[in-house]
């Protein structure tokens, strides 16, 4: 039997949303009592909160919606590449050289999860995150990677106005998963 790990971050009222976006909120709208046979809750949140997959539609008006993205990309063996303590505000780029040692595992699993620990406090939105260089996205695509997961809110810089890396990854048919745990 194979193990399955849940890599999603918990959704809580304290989770810092993308600046200006809708924060996560949960409330009980019905409560179990003598006059009510069930508890019922309501959620209000942005799809960008917590662990999430960006569909091509997120960046391209004619892109595929998330229900068209193959679920198989997100389920299966993956290699976790530990990049903890490799990055800082002055060295924010992830290069091929940072990933190359895991090439055999990448080629075997075709799913890559990058562990940076650059977002340790989910109650405070980060003011910078490490991002992949364009060459690293192309290299992962050449290895036929079907999923790139990161433990930060995005694969692009926080201050980006044009989503260069995410757009490149989708053009390379490389789905991304952000905010993984």
Image: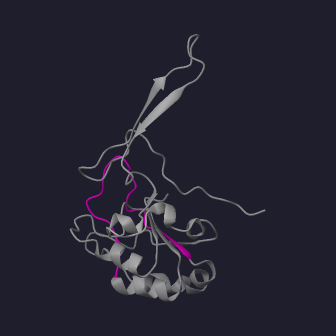
Left/right placement of residue 103 relative to residue 175 reads: right
Q: Looking at the image, what colour scheme do you see?
A: one colour
Q: Is residue 165 above or below residue 120?
A: below
Which span of residues is magenta-colored?
A: 111-133
Magenta stretch secondary structure, dominant:
loop
Residue at image x 40%, y 76%?
170
Q: Is residue 22 left or right of residue 152?
A: left
Going by the picture, which residue comes out furthest to the top? Answer: 34
Question: Could you say where residue 21 lies in the image, as x and y percent from the top left?
Answer: 28, 49
Residue 123: x and y, percent? 35, 46
Q: Quadrant of residue 151?
A: bottom left
* Residue pictured at 43% horizontal, 41% vertical: 12
Residue situated furthest right in the rendering: 1
Which one is in front, 118 or 165? 165
**Residue 112 image point, x, y percent:** 52, 74
- Say which quarter of the image contains residue 57: bottom left
Query: Residue 85: x percent and y percent?
Result: 41, 69
Left or right of residue 138: residue 90: left
């Amino acid at each position: 039997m194979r193990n399955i790990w849940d890599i999603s971050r918990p959704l809580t009222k304290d989770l810092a949303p993308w600046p200006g976006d809708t924060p996560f909120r949960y409330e009980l709208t019905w409560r179990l009592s003598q006059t009510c046979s069930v508890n019922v809750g309501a959620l209000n949140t942005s799809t960008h909160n917590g662990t999430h997959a960006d569909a091509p539609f997120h960046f391209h008006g004619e892109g595929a919606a998330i229900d068209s993205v193959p679920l198989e990309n997100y389920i299966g063996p993956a290699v976790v590449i530990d990049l903890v303590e490799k990055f800082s505000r002055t060295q924010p780029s992830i290069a091929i050289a940072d990933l190359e040692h895991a090439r055999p595992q990448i080629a075997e699993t075709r799913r890559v999860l990058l562990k940076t620990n650059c977002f340790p406090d989910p109650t405070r939105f980060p003011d910078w995150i490490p991002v992949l260089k364009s060459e690293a996205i192309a290299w992962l695509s050449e290895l036929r990677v079907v999923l790139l997961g990161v433990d930060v809110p995005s694969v692009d810089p926080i201050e980006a106005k044009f989503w260069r890396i995410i757009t490149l990854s989708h053009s390379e048919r490389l789905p991304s998963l952000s905010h993984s745990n």
